[in-house]
Amino acid sequence: MRHEKSDYKYLFGPVRSRRLGISLGVDMVPYKTCTLNCIYCECGATTDYPTQRGEFVPTAAVKKELDDYLSSHPEVDFVTFGGSGEPTLHSGIGEIARFIKDNFPQVKTALLTNSTFFHMPDVRQQVLAFDLILPSLDAVSQKAFVKINKPMVSVDCEMIIEGLEKLSAQFKGQIWLEVFIVPGINDTKKELTLFKEAIERIKPTRVQLNSLDRPGTCSWLTPASAQQLQQVADFLMPLAVEIIARNFPPPDPQKLRLKASSLLSIIKRRPSTVEDLSVSLGMTLNEVSKLLDELSQSGTITSEITGNSTFFRA
């Protein structure tokens, strides 16, 4: 669903997002300008591999479009920087994020990124203006990384992990680390062991498991089954894990009922976030969220927002 004006060059949507509510997109670079050529990318193959950052689209023009849209559309939950390329390639990303924060403080900002520039201190400094960062990490071994993400020569896996680790130590908002599962490549016991070690270093707020739901750039790519995704989630426990793939079924109601008393005993003692409860109970974020929804609807629990987190209490 696009805005009724058709002359926006850099904004798209808003769309109703599974993760972000009503999300207005911002395209920061020309179509398929990226540092990776991921086999699952729904936008198609990368056509331009830039070797350095720059002002790929005019910063002033992006700010002008945002001012025009947000001045008359206060219902937006997030302005999301993503689109058809890697947004951190744009040298003005921090300036634009701060512009939104200064002029429309009620609107939250989110960054969808492939994580390839967080080894650079100036990039980490610029993205501190965001409320939420959703970085990708699809592989930890270089072999799997090359197969899935097909990087430009100067990008390597350890550099990405170290950058994410440093970002997590600096960033005050939430980090939702997305892992795209490719059966047979990054879901083996060896790869998942490396994943768990890397995620423990990075310390994201939550881990989101995804899989193919639209055609990618490779015809041989198949989606991970619900069972495969659940096995990965179980392996990564007690990390706060959420399965966001469209083909994943809702949690088992009987299992949730058995966990309800344990959840209530925790939040009677101290307010907790969904991520806290996921780790404490050994449940995926999907299961905890479903249980919290049911308890909220019955009036058994309440919630309050503090900073960038939602806390639940009995």
Image: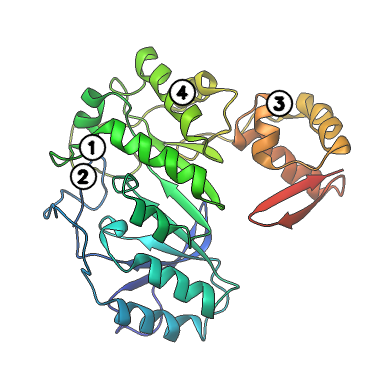
**Residue situated in front as seen by the camera: 249 or 140:** 140
The amino acid pointed to by label 4 is Lys
> Identity of the amino acid at label 2?
Leu
Considering the image in quadrants, where does the N terminus appear? Answer: bottom left
Residue drawn at x 32%, y 44% as measured from the top left? 119
Disc 2 and disc 1 in contact, CB within 8 angstroms: yes
Check disc 4 and report the residue beneath it.
196
> Looking at the image, which is closer to me, 151 or 294?
151
Kindly check if marks 1 and 4 are in contact, taking CB atoms under 8 A apart as contact.
no
Q: Is residue 77 above or below residue 174?
A: below
The residue lying furthest to the top in this view is 189
CA–CA distance in space, label 2 to label 1: 6 Å
Q: Give above or below for 121 relative to 97.
A: above
Precedes in sequence: disc 1 or disc 4:
1
- Residue 9 lies, in percent from the top left, at 27, 77
First in residue order: circle 2 vs circle 4? 2
User: Within 10 angstroms of label 2, few (less than 14), some, or many (20 or more) residues?
Assistant: many
Around disc 4, counting alpha carbons within 10 Å, would you say few (fewer than 14), some (14 to 19), or many (20 or more)? Answer: some
Q: Nearer the viewer, mark 4 or mark 3?
A: 4
User: Residue under circle 2?
Assistant: 36
Q: Residues within 10 Å of mark 3 (few under 14, many from 20)?
A: some
Residue ID at (83%, 39%)? 270
Q: Earlier in the sequence, mark 2 or mark 1?
A: 2
Circles 2 and 3: CB distance less than 8 Å?
no
The amino acid type of the residue labelled 1 equals: Asn
